[in-house]
Amino acid sequence: MNVRAHIVLLAAALSLGACSSQSTHYYTLIAPQDAASAAVAQPLFQFNMLPVSIPVQVDQPQVVLRDGDGSLAILESELWGGPLGDEFHDALTGQLERRFGVRDLAGLPRQSDQPVLSVRTDVRRFESVLNQYALIDVVWNLSLSSRDNKRRNLTCSSVIREPAGAGVKNLVLAHQRAVANLADAIAKTADDWTREPVSRCWSGAQ
């Protein structure tokens, strides 16, 4: 083997070694249960969480960062534990279950003597700016189906920005707090609106 070939093989081996030594990290939007807010008063409805819509630009296996110049950076070794839409759905569902004091109806039988509150969320923006902040811009709809099959709806929006410490882990924690704040807005609005139909979106949700 000549010297040139030896150098090429050595460089390739070092490159492969560097790639293999880069560890992969997985993150979730689901916060620990003890980090959730206390439940509101027991509501007089059943809870149905509908699928979540996520912008395609960030609905990737990898964590996607937004730079100040408007560009996006995909972190190949920093991954979500599941599809981002599912992560957001499951995180928000768990937060709302604890605030409502009832389980999501998915896979459970409905009770004919109680109305059903359906929650739909459309995430318009899911921004992750490293070492700075996490931001979510969400339009959400509440739909209440009464026992006599009458339905009424309320649409609200929330723009929530949480400061983030250094690193991807702190950025994910900031997103977890943003989802928790969104759950607060939805739960407080739903609690008031289901009891008093004339009430509107919770002021803290705007």
Image (cartoon, rainbow, N blue to C red):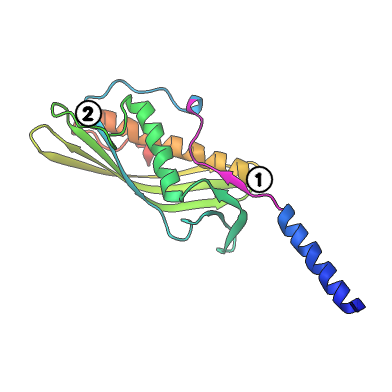
Q: Is residue 63 left or right of residue 11?
A: left
The image position of residue 133, as x and y in percent, is: 57, 46
Up-down relation of residue 141 to residue 14 (above or below):
above
Where disc 2 sits, the SS reads loop
Q: Is residue 61 left or right of residue 159?
A: right
Split into 4 quadrants, where in the image is the N terminus?
bottom right
Q: Earlier in the sequence, mark 2 or mark 1?
A: 2
> Looking at the image, which is closer to me, 195 or 27?
27
> Looking at the image, which is closer to me, 15 or 204?
15
Mark 1: amino acid: Gly
Q: Is residue 74 visible?
A: yes
The image position of residue 134, as x and y in percent, is: 53, 46
Q: Badge 1 is on which residue?
A: 167
Which numbered marker is on residue 45?
2
Q: Residues within 10 Å of mark 1 (few under 14, many from 20)?
A: few
Q: Is residue 65 left or right of residue 193?
A: right
The residue furthest left is 148
Q: Is residue 81 left or right of residue 169?
A: left
Where disc 1 sits, the SS reads loop
The image position of residue 202, as x and y in percent, is: 33, 35
User: What residue sits 43% from the left and 38% below the top?
Assistant: 91
Which segment is the magenta one? 22-33
In magenta stretch: residue 16: no
Most common secondary structure along the magenta stretch = loop
Split into 4 quadrants, where in the image is the C terminus?
top left
The image position of residue 190, as x and y in percent, is: 28, 33
Task: Measure the alpha-carbon separation of dots 2 and 1.
Answer: 41 Å
